[in-house]
């Protein structure tokens, strides 16, 4: 079975400081990894994905994530956080072997609060 | 394109009532899914479809039915609502060959 862990329920950071949101995963084969963001009373928005290739993935709104196979991690980062980055962030994984369907497994979410 | 649309936005049901949550997409996506979101548990897959006429169960399918008669629509039916089904429900879609999903705005359901 595949699983995702986001060890921090909330991350607080001052505006302008670096932001990191942690994610570790477990799959039986090679993973497809995703980050989504959810603003209040909205659906989830896709930020970035790792499918194959370069371990550093760049996405929307200045976010990036680093895939580390040995540590089974896919941490989300932003060099300089903005107040508008305050939201709920979800990491998700899909086993590459599961070619059919939409069996995407989500972590529990990490709330990011960026203070001015 | 309107993207993924969901109706209603809010709904209150009494235990035992039935209802259908509507989901539609105008992007000609083959894959569609229903998730529920509960605090601290992320999103959990209820049912999904890989194309018109084909559906399958996800992680938490009990108490829910789906059908996919057209590419555009993927309704979720609650046959006999229970308080444990109080949640926020999201519909999502993706095209063949892409891996990221597009989510609707959600339906907040309360069962009393």
Image (spheres, grey):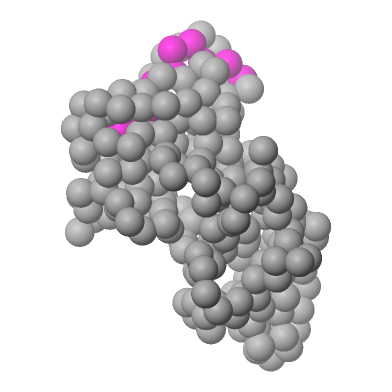
Can residue B103 be seen here?
yes
Q: Is residue A100 left or right of residue A14?
A: left
Residue at the image position 55 percent from the left and 79 percent from the top? A54
Task: State the residue in front, B79 or A5.
Answer: A5
Q: Is residue B108 left or right of residue A112?
A: left
Where does residue B10 sit, x and y in percent of width and height?
44, 36
Residue at the image position 66 percent from the left and 88 percent from the top? A79
Task: State the residue in front, B91 or B83.
Answer: B91
Q: Is residue A74 left or right of residue B14?
A: right
Can residue B12 be seen here?
no
The image quarter containing residue A70 is bottom right
The image quarter containing residue A55 is bottom right
The residue segment tinted magenta is B74-83
Q: Quadrant of the C terminus of chain A?
A: bottom right
Above-or-below relation of B39 to A55 = above
Where does residue A30 sit, x and y in percent of width and height?
60, 56
Above-or-below relation of A110 to A19 = above
The image quarter containing residue B56 is top left
Most frequent secondary structure within the magenta stretch:
loop
> Is B44 colored magenta in this rendering?
no
Residue at the image position 51 percent from the left and 30 percent from the top? B58
Q: Quadrant of the N terminus of chain A?
A: top right
Q: Is residue B12 left or right of residue A87?
A: left
């Amino acid at each position: 079975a595949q699983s995702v862990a986001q060890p921090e329920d909330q991350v607080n950071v001052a505006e302008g400081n670096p932001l990191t949101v942690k994610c570790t995963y477990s799959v039986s084969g090679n993973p497809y990894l995703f980050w989504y963001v959810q603003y209040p009373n909205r659906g989830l928005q896709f930020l970035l994905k790792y499918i194959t290739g370069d371990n550093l993935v760049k996405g929307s709104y200045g976010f990036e994530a680093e895939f580390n196979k040995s540590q089974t991690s896919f941490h989300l980062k932003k060099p300089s956080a903005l107040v508008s980055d305050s939201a709920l962030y979800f990491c998700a994984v899909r086993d590459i072997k599961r070619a059919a369907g939409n069996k995407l497994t989500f972590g529990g979410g990490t709330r990011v609060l960026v203070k001015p | 394109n309107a993207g993924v649309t969901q109706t209603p936005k809010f709904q209150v049901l009494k235990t035992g009532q039935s209802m259908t949550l509507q989901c539609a997409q105008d992007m000609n996506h083959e894959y569609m899914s229903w998730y529920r979101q509960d605090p601290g548990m992320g999103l959990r897959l209820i049912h999904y479809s890989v194309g018109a006429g084909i559906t399958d169960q996800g992680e938490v399918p009990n108490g829910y039915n789906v059908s996919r008669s057209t590419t555009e629509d993927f309704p979720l039916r609650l046959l006999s609502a229970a308080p444990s089904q109080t949640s926020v429900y999201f519909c999502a879609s993706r095209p063949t060959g892409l891996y990221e999903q597009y989510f609707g705005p959600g339906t907040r359901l309360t069962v009393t």
